[in-house]
Structures are given as C-alpha cells and as structure tokens.
Image (spheres, grey):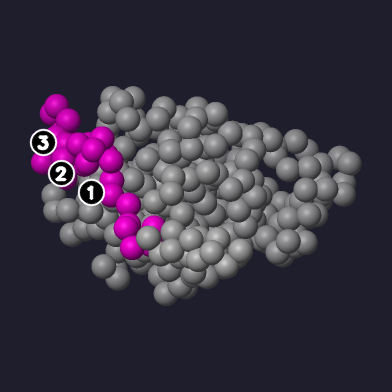
Amino acid sequence: MAGIFDRMRDGEQQIVAQPPAPSPAATEIARMVLRDGFEDRVPLAPKPCLGIVLGTGMGSLVRHLEDKRTVDFSEMGWLPSVTAVGHAGRLVWGNVGDHSVVMLQGRVHAYEGLPVEMLYRGVELFAALGIDRVLLTNASGGLATDLLVGEIVVLNDHIDLVRNALAAEYRTTNGGYVYDELSSSEAVRAAQVAGHRCRRGVYAYCLGPNYETRAEYRMLKTLGADVVGMSTVPEVIVARSFGMRVVAASVVTNLANSIDREDRQPLDGEDVCQTAASAGNGMWAIVQQILRKI
C-alpha cells in the first residue's frame, strides 16, 4: 500500500514539474492574432495582458474595446462553435487605453456534448498569446438568502460537482487558493465603488442544461455554495495549470429564495441574458481595476 501512495505522490510531483504547453493549433492562431492577422484585420499590438471570457449576457462588454477586431470561432476552425443562448462565438481583441485585451465572446459547456478538451480551448489560446491574467464571467443562480438579482459574486472558491476528466497535464495541485486573492478583493471594491452590489462567494459547478430542482437548491446551500452555474470551473483549473492569475465573477440572474413556492415562475434563457447584461457596468469596473494593476 505504501508503494502505491509513493507512486501517486511521484506522479503528482512529475505533473507539477512539467507545466502544460499550448497545442500547435493554439500557437498557430496566436501567431495570426499577434503578427499575421486574419485577412484584412490588423494584428494585435502590443502583446495582450488580459484575457476575458464573456459568459451569458456579458457579450456587450466588447463595445468598450478601441480598435476592435473580431473573428468568428467557425472561421478559425479550432475553437468550437457555441450553441447556448447569449453566446456569440467570437474572438475579439483590441485596446483599453495602453493595454491590449483579448475577449472570448461566449463559451461552450459540458452539457453541449463536446469532448472535454473543447471546454478550455479558449484558455489554451490565452496561454499561447502569452496572457498571464484572466477574468472569467458567467451567469448563475443565487443560493445565499440575502443575494439580489443582478448582484455580482466574485468567486473565492468552488464546488466541482461535474469533475470533468481533464488531461493529465492539467491535473495539478493548486492548493487551497485557486482564485487570486488580492485581485479578487480589489475587484469587489471596484464594483462597489461603481455603485454595484458585489461580494465574494462560493460557486457550485453543475452539468446542466436543466436548472436545478428545489431539492437540489437546498442541497447546494447545505454544501456551502452561494451561487450555482454550468461553466467556468474547467477554465479555472486549466488557467491555473498554465500559471495564470484568475479572477472569476458571476452575475446572479435568479434566486432560490422561493424554492418552496409552487407558483415559482419557470426560468427563460433570454431573461437570464437580460438580467446578466444589467450588471455590465459593474463588470466593466472590475476589468478596469485589473488593468490598473498591470
């Protein structure tokens, strides 16, 4: 038995000692973004310092970019096409003041039936671009009793109820601090200064695509989750494996405080998108705060 544990420990140490490298496909797309361009699109300069994944309802944040360039995922042939409501499926890059920023306008989810490696190809592309800081956004259901619709929850931890079978190079031990503590705390203060309700919290990652039942809401609250959603965690794990500093921000689009009411209205994807978009100003304040510290 001791030998088994020794081999497990040695294998873990080997994985940690050999950080992953972006795939050739990710590297080729990064080269096109940085130097060669896509047809008539001007390459990105200087090197980007921040990568942002725009979740449900957050796609309009691309309007803040100056000298913006856009490529559909389908045009690149490597980033997977998206099917979820509120996800445009575009790679967008441009400038915010003196900083270059790359955004993924949408993501794919495990429930869409794609191979697991598709879930984090966007983060892999960020790594190929040399980005070392990421902001991951999503829409979520609120579990904590004092949350309000439209509030932003900056994650300080997560509960992974899906356990996607990631490749071995991404199964590193990140310790108890997956999310960048300083940047996350500063993000909360920035959103609050901008007049938006914002706090830290724990995110429960579920498969979906169905929304949770009343019994599941009660279970997740018992486990200590503040919000629940269907994305982000695989991206977080892979980003940390690449050595990136991670901030993740979730917009509460519906509440579980009426879980025992039989007349509770069913959720609609379009309503979720509109509610998430209402937090755009607070989310952009978080982006600006991250850039100020670079």
Question: Is 188 left, or right, of 111 in this rendering?
Answer: left
Disc 1 crowd rating (10 Å Cα; few below 14, some 14-19, many 20+) is many
Instruction: Determine which residue is flagged by label 3.
Output: 36
Question: Is 129 left, or right, of 116 in this rendering?
Answer: left
> Does 60 lie within the magenta span?
no
Q: Amino acid at mark 2?
A: Leu
Q: Amino acid at mark 3?
A: Asp
Q: Residue at x 61, y 46 (%)?
A: 162
Image spot of residue 75 (x, y percent)? 28, 25
Give how far apart the Cα atoms at labels 3 and 2 are: 7 Å
**Which image quadrant: the N terminus?**
bottom right
Q: Residue at x 48, y 37 (%)?
A: 116
Q: In the structure shown, which secondary structural element does the residue marked by tag 3 occupy?
A: helix
Q: Are marks 1 and 2 in contact (CB under 8 Å)?
A: yes
Q: Nearest the camera: 196 or 152?
A: 152
Image spot of residue 238 (x, y percent)? 41, 52
Mark positioned earlier in the residue sequence (1 or 2): 2
Instruction: Determine which residue is flagged by label 2.
Output: 34
Vertical placement of residue 186 versus 224, above or below: below
| Segment colored magenta | 15-44
Q: Are marks 3 and 2 in contact (CB under 8 Å)?
A: no
Q: Amino acid at mark 1?
A: Leu
Instruction: Determine which residue is flagged by label 1.
Output: 129
Disc 3 crowd rating (10 Å Cα; few below 14, some 14-19, many 20+) is some
Q: Quadrant of residue 153?
A: bottom right
Q: Residue at x 66, y 61 (%)?
A: 226
Give how far apart the Cα atoms at labels 3 and 1 are: 13 Å
